[in-house]
Amino acid sequence: MRHVTVCWILSRVIFYGSDKEEMEMVITQTPFRISFFGGGTDYPGFYENYGGSVISTTFDKYCYATVRHLPRFFDYANQITYNVIERTNHVDEIEHPAVREIMKYLDMHELRVVYEADLPARSGLGTSSSFAVGLLNACYALKGKYVDKRHLADDAIYVERVLCKESGGIQDQIAASFGGFNRIDFDAGGYHVNPLVISEERKKQLNHNLMLFFTGFSRFSSDIALSQEKAIKGRTAQLMEMKGLVDEAEKILTSKVDLREFGNLLDYTWHLKREITSSISSDSIDLLYRRALKAGAIGGKLLGAGGGGFLLFYVEREKQAAVLEELSHLLYVPFEFETGGTRIMYYKSEDFDLKGIKKSYA
């Protein structure tokens, strides 16, 4: 036993130095988003020519990124844990594209990264972008650097759209970074985040009239986004109309108009968006939508790029029991709006000196 203890102490001296007693870590919490109107107008191919606008909110379902330096007791240099566990000796060997590119972008090495979430990935809630934002936030903190929400959003857009070469818009990264109920406008010069001024009472009424259901059909949003991106050139008129609906939705939300009109506008957008590309929906999802409306929902939408994931409905309180019964085979997910955006839940200053330690990997 004494021999093991002595070896352990020597290893600490060799690997860390005698004054190093613990490994620091950073944990970030980043919300998912619900996009109500304007989806598709946040694609560079559209907004750089015509401008774009979306209305979205973040809500109280989150992903968590835990980042720390990996202790040097192992025969691998990095461990990445999500739905699988990756162990690699070099950053370039990491299969998860966002983790690999963020580590290279920020010159991070020898990390243990853990991803956890309240809701499943590939479900239309911007989960991949929320993770990218949260991981960037954690890595910057581990390096002892503070960056603001715009910096995080810009970096996440660059990582996903440029370094990872994934198709899609840019609203998800912005929503996850800033948090809150916002109108986001896009043009060739960039983007502008404008919080919607809505009374708390009206916001609560809207929140309580929204019902979220998981369809169980998950897919890669970048695959759907690619087909949307190709369809943009031939659907400019529909996208221009979707952009205009953002103005109508803002008027409804910020005035005293009956909130039923918000539901009606969701229904109109549902049919309009299906004109852009057939991959937005499917026969099974169309059937679920019709059943919900028959049970009393006023309108709804499939969240994200389309193809599956979560269905959101506007349902007045007296009709919600009937909708719940009609869609009882689906998972119902109650939620509340949130305003914080990405944040650091746990932080301790990082003083692990990689340059002062030499170790070769097989």
Image: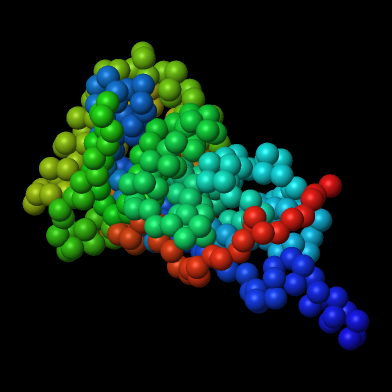
Q: Which residue lies furthest to the front in this view?
A: 356
Q: Quadrant of residue 223?
A: top right
Residue drawn at (18%, 63%) of the image: 200
Above or below, 100 relative to 338: above
Q: Residue furthest top?
A: 234
Q: Residue 21 vs residue 347: left or right? A: right
Does the image show residue 299? no
Q: Quadrant of residue 350?
A: bottom right
Above or below, 153 relative to 232: below
Q: Which residue lies furthest to the left in this view?
A: 256
Q: Residue 115 vs residue 148: left or right? A: right
In front of the other: 206 or 243 = 243
Q: Where is residue 35 in the image (x, y as percent from the top left)?
A: 34, 43
Q: Quadrant of residue 236?
A: top left
Indicate the colouring scheme.
Answer: rainbow
Does the image show residue 111? yes
Q: Position of residue 11 (x, y in %)?
A: 79, 70
Quadrant where the N terminus lies?
bottom right
Q: Residue 139 vs residue 320: left or right? A: right
Above or below, 49 relative to 307: above
- Tally of marks: 0
Q: Position of residue 81 (x, y in %)?
A: 66, 55
In front of the other: 263 or 233 = 233
Q: Position of residue 285 (x, y in %)?
A: 48, 37
Above or below, 323 relative to 272: below
Residue drawn at (25%, 48%) of the image: 182
In front of the other: 199 or 128 = 128
Residue drawn at (14%, 60%) of the image: 199
Residue drawn at (40%, 61%) of the image: 343
